[in-house]
Amino acid sequence: MRREIPMIVAFVAGVIIILEFFVPTLRNVAGQLQKWYLVVVAFAILVGAFNLLRMNYMKVRGRRVDWPYSIVLIVGLFAMTIVGIGWGIGQGTVFDWLFNYLMFPMSSTMFALLAFFVASAAYRAFRARTVDATLLLVAAVIVMLGQVPIGSIWVPSWWPDSLVFLTPDWLKDRIMNIFNTAGQRAILIGASLGVVSTALRILLGIERSYLGEE
Amino acid sequence: MKSAYAVLLLTVALTAAAHGQTLRTAENAAAADKAVDAGGSIDVTWAPSPDELEAEVKVLGYEVWRARRPAGDYKKLADVEAGKESYNFTDEEAENGVEYFYKVRVRGEEMSTDTAPVGPAKATREWFHPNRLNMLIAAVLLSAFILYYISQARAGKVLFIRRIAGLEAVQEAVGRATEMGKPVLFVPGIADIDDIQTIAAVTILGRVATMVAEYDASLLVPCSRSLVMSTAQEVVKEAYLEAGRPDAYRRENISYLTDDQFGYVAGVDGIMVREKPAANFYLGTFYAESLILAETGHSIGAIQIAGTAMPSQLPFFIAACDYTLIGEELFAASAYLSREPRLLGSLVGQDWGKVVILISIILGVVTAFLAQFGVEIFGRSIALEQLFVVK
């Protein structure tokens, strides 16, 4: 029964949600199921917060590598919770101030790292050692030139319309709208079929690895 | 001159009074059952009062009133603010099969004017969405293919599955981690468990965890959603049980970090730099964090296997990881790794679905091309594109 009950729940809930797309009458039932999911998520947040606290407490107690950061995390977790519950989370509150002037800049800093990682990854990916990599390099250079203002500056005003296909703008549009879009759609079609197949396997109880069964 | 001035003043005063006394009603008011719904809803629509458009008299807003009879006792349902080109209010408290009449009241500063009663309108429930018949046929056809090949696999037929390099490398990656005495890091994306990519990632986690348990390596699973963490803990625990190594299961290795996207990235990067895992798996839904994770993993020299169905993140994974599962390969991974015939059968069925889509695309292109030249059958355009529109 330990396996059968979750499988029955997955089957019934999954079938209702799928049928709701075709049978409008089931919309209310499906909406109710989604509300139940939200309730479960709300409780799971508490489980997550407790897990986070426990993990970091154990790290501090065991004086493991970089344990002082765990103190910062615990203090931050309690500070934000107390400030949020005690004084609210609306505009102009202490919580809002902490979010805007601590949380937000820290997130932005992590996001900003992306620029450097793009450069290092591009350097490795664009080394023209094979035909594929050379094609990638050429396409990338054209798209980059087409995306930035400097790409169109070198095209003089007297450039004939008949040679427009040699300008970065024109080439970039073709690469992005034809080759890139076609590739992305192929991936999406394949992925959508994969989604249907995975859903069927789970609903029919053929795929049970999520229950820990081979 | 004085009398002419007096006449002019009188005219202006009379015009103003006339405008103040009349407030023109909303136009084209109508009430009808809300199309293709579960019942209990009626749509009331109307166009603005001409006074709102001409701004001669200030219109503050509109009110929707409802009654069972045209001359019955009307009850106010809602206030709607003015300032739109057209208005729509859905009465979601209607009883199915009961006739209702509606009035729209234009509210001015000093007075208000009602439309004539509109109706009767009855809420009804619909049992089928007619515009989605094409989707239903496609879903049934694809499911039939998948079920047919699952039954073929059950009957013992040997099915050909193409080699997927990224999945062949899973065992190599886990083996490498074991030899080096370093952990395996599994990142199940940043979406919640209601995302199908996360579900696919968790099913693969079960397979990877079994391998890790058999090889006696250690597994780290930092999660960005608490529900994913709870599910992952159960999946990994069961995998260790299946492998006969329940004692090796470490609950604390499957932890929750944060829901915040970049906070999560910082946490996972920290784990990578501290623990130096020998094999990193990034499977599931990823956004801008994909490259930050993969480049950090590359910097510590880990063998990296990624997989996602997010087309915008695939180039980053391809550039920074050793192997990348593209789109459908992510969903095929669990079946591929298990080598279980019934699961493999579903992959063959999926491939036949792809054949049908390819044929449809070719037919669509040909018929759309012919339709450009006015080729018609039975007086109708033969373009098939409308058959594939989802509403």
Image (cartoon, rainbow, N blue to C red):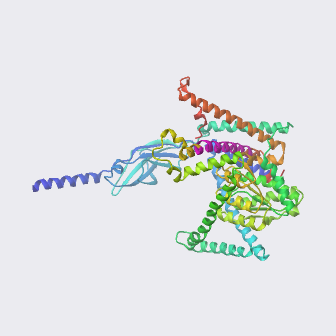
Task: Give the x, y percent position of residue B343.
Answer: 80, 44
- Where, quadrant-wise, is the N terminus of chain B in this rendering? bottom left
The residue shown at (59%, 45%) is: A176
Occupied quadrant, residue B108 = bottom left
Task: Give the x, y percent position of residue B340.
Answer: 84, 45
Between B226 and A72, the residue placed more toward the observer is A72
Which stretch appears magenta? Answer: A175-198
Task: Give the x, y percent position of residue A213.
Answer: 83, 52
The correct choice, above or below, for A82 with respect to B386 in the image is below
- Where, quadrant-wise, is the C terminus of chain B in this rendering? top right
The correct choice, above or below, for A120 with respect to B382 in the image is below
Q: Specify whether B124 is left or right of B188.
A: left
Q: Main secondary structure of the magenta part?
A: helix
The residue shown at (81%, 62%) is: B183
Between A25 and A56, the residue placed more toward the observer is A56
Between A31 and B8, the residue placed more toward the observer is B8
Work out which residue is located at the far left of the displayed protein and give it.
Answer: B1
Q: Specify whether A98 is left or right of A48.
A: left
The residue shown at (84%, 42%) is: B341
Between B251 and B31, the residue placed more toward the observer is B251
Q: Specify whether B12 is left or right of A69.
A: left
The residue shown at (69%, 52%) is: A127
Task: Give the x, y percent position of residue A173.
Answer: 56, 45
The correct choice, above or below, for B14 with respect to A85 in the image is above
- Is residue A1 something one can see in this rendering? no
Indicate whether residue B39 is drawn in magenta: no
- Is residue B150 something one can see in this rendering? yes
Q: Specify whether B242 is left or right of A196.
A: right
